[in-house]
Image (tube, rainbow, N blue to C red):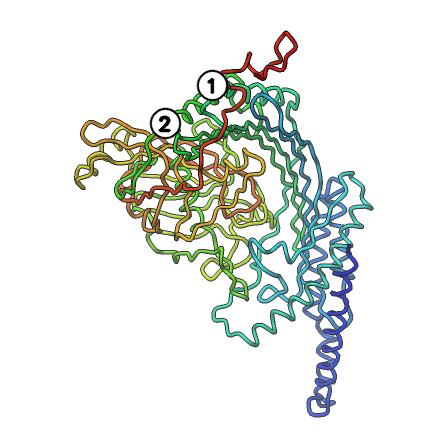
Amino acid sequence: MRTAPHLISTLAVMCLALAGACRAAESTSPEKTAKPSEKAASDNKKEESPDKSELSEAKTKAAIHSSHKLADDVLSKALTDELLRTVSELKISNRQKPYFVAYTILDHEGFSVFGSFGALDQVSDHRYRTLKADVRVGDYKLDSSGRQGFFSFMDNRRGSASIDDDYDALRHELWLNTDYQYKRAIEGLENKKAILQQKKIEDLPDSMSKAEPAVSMQPEVRLNVNRDEWQKTVRDISALFRSYPQVIDSTVMFSGESRTRWFANSEGSLNRESLHGVMFGISANGQAPDGMRVSDFEVFSATDEKKLPSPAELAQRAKVLAERIRDLASAKTMEDYRGPILFEKQAAAELFAQALAPRLVNKIESLSGYSRFNRANEKPGRKILPTYISVIDDPLATEFNGQPLKGGYLVDDEGVQARKVTLVENGILKTYCSSRSPGRDVKESNGHLIDGVISPSQLFIVSSRSEPLDKLKEKLIALGKEEGLDYVLLVRRISSTLSSLVTPGRSSFFYSSEDVQMHPPTLLYKVYVNDGHEELVRGAKFSRLTHRLFRDITALADDAAPYPVYYQFAFGSSSKTLVTPSVLISEIDIERESHETDTPMILKNAYFDEQKTNTGQTPKDGTSGIR
């Protein structure tokens, strides 16, 4: 499997080496040859002072030797040993040596169980290690690094690593990856230079920013969950939906994961970063008489299984969810609407996670300019929120008002120390979450490359002006009266990518041509302005959203709390935490969602068939129960 890429790389390198030899011959032609006196002076100067590259290599080796002294396990020793050999010896004749090398080993252990209608559908228990080598030629200003973001995996060869702590096996895989990436790097730098000769790019950012080496050796973690108990809990809670005929489909899941990441680079960084997380999810779907599908979900996320709700609490939440689905199936459909909307609790968290968080990430442009999935950002210094709102990302926080947070870390994927960053201050955009890949506006890393993508970790929506939630509802109704509306809208829950994680096989990809992408609301209520009573409605979606919607924020409540979120743009990452209060926005568009392709079920669920002898069990007389 490895022969073809290596063969292609080797042939390309041979061609490049031949071209380099021709250029070298040209540089020594009579017209360009230095005079003997100049050459002698130059030789004397070289003898008097060491070459800069020699000084740089000596400094790199010293940095690696320093970090190697702190390597306290087989993996970190294998990383630093191979790193030292690479910077000392790796070189193709007439080609540049690597100026930067980094190694990452990720140990992932996971357990998940899915159940439906009282039975288990899937149980998975696994552990594996992956290895990645980042080998660059060139320099910090222009190097061989490839694409950023979603398609960056195409430029990398991710190898597997032994789950046994076998030093020789690890060194073997590091050697294979290093060789592959070095040859790709030589090609990559030449390709970049060729593109720049053909394409004029103004204000081209550097390829990589410099960063202080970070040494942080956290304890390795292993997954610690009660597998048998969670299988029983999933089975028992999924059986509760046998009491709700209106729920046509449901899934209950538990998942736990532990990850330990080893990282070392040629600048002297050496890290071992660990995380442990669990999640319990419940999803349910129903169908209205007109065939429209309705759905909702509950997700609970924590760093430890003991911090999840008890089985009794989870059972109660499952029953409440089933009752919501029953009510949604019988609710009236929503018509088009423009006016004020109050986003309560989880809905507020999803509003900020889906519509604001993507604007807080440093955009990295590739030389090809491919940016289908990148939305343009405002420049730092511009107002994007009301003056009484600030946004802070703090990966070092561990709790909020006594509630544990999930998504923090000490060192990011590039070995940069995590730090608290004020992204928006008094409504003004100050900076973005950034990595060591500079953008046009933010050139330095603030330690936010997480799970391979630039992403917020733990976002805090902070307001210097807040009021009780019931006051926001009064303001909502007042706004409706001012605009002559019969009713206003209140959103209590919004669908998200988290719901797809609960149901295996359901796609988590969501893409819209809208300037701002938002999943539809699952719990939407009309609030009538004459008496304030609420009416549940279904079949709505957000429409014509733009970045200006946050300028229409009217008020925030004083009910800030942490909620689990999953950033749609952070492909493959884990769930994070977003802390926010409820929020009132003066104007948003809602459209009725099309459901022409939805048709009612033809037959009833056999379990609820009135002609059954009993509840699906084989009758005592030995018959099948089918009549």
Residue 232 image-quadrant placement: top right
Circle 2 crowding by C-alpha within 10 Å: few under 14, some 14–19, many from 20: some
Q: Secondary structure at mark 2?
A: helix
Q: Residue furthest front?
A: 627
Q: Is residue 363 above or below residue 498?
A: below
- Inter-mark Cα distance, 1 to 2: 22 Å
Residue that mark 1 sits on: 316
At horizontal 28% and vertical 38% (from top left) the residue drawn is 555
Classify the position of the C terminus by image quarter. Answer: top right
Classify the position of the N terminus by image quarter. Answer: bottom right
Residue 441 image-quadrant placement: bottom left
Labels 1 and 2: the sequence-earlier one: 1
Q: Position of residue 72 (x, y in %)?
A: 73, 40
Type of amino acid at the residue the image marks with label 1: Gln
- Horizontal side of 558 relative to 3 (left or right) equals left
At horizontal 64% and vertical 7% (from top left) the residue drawn is 621
At horizontal 49% and vertical 17% (from top left) the residue drawn is 243
Closest to the camera, between mark 1 and mark 2, is 2
Type of amino acid at the residue the image marks with label 2: Ser
Q: Nearer the viewer, residue 454 or 44?
A: 454
- Horizontal side of 526 relative to 434 (left or right) equals left
- Horizontal side of 300 relative to 422 (left or right) equals right
Q: Nearer the viewer, residue 99 or 522?
A: 522
- Horizontal side of 403 relative to 547 (left or right) equals right
Q: Position of residue 71 (x, y in %)?
A: 72, 43
At horizontal 50% and vertical 52% (from top left) the residue drawn is 434
Circle 1 crowding by C-alpha within 10 Å: few under 14, some 14–19, many from 20: some
**Mark linked to residue 307:** none
Residue that mark 2 sits on: 330
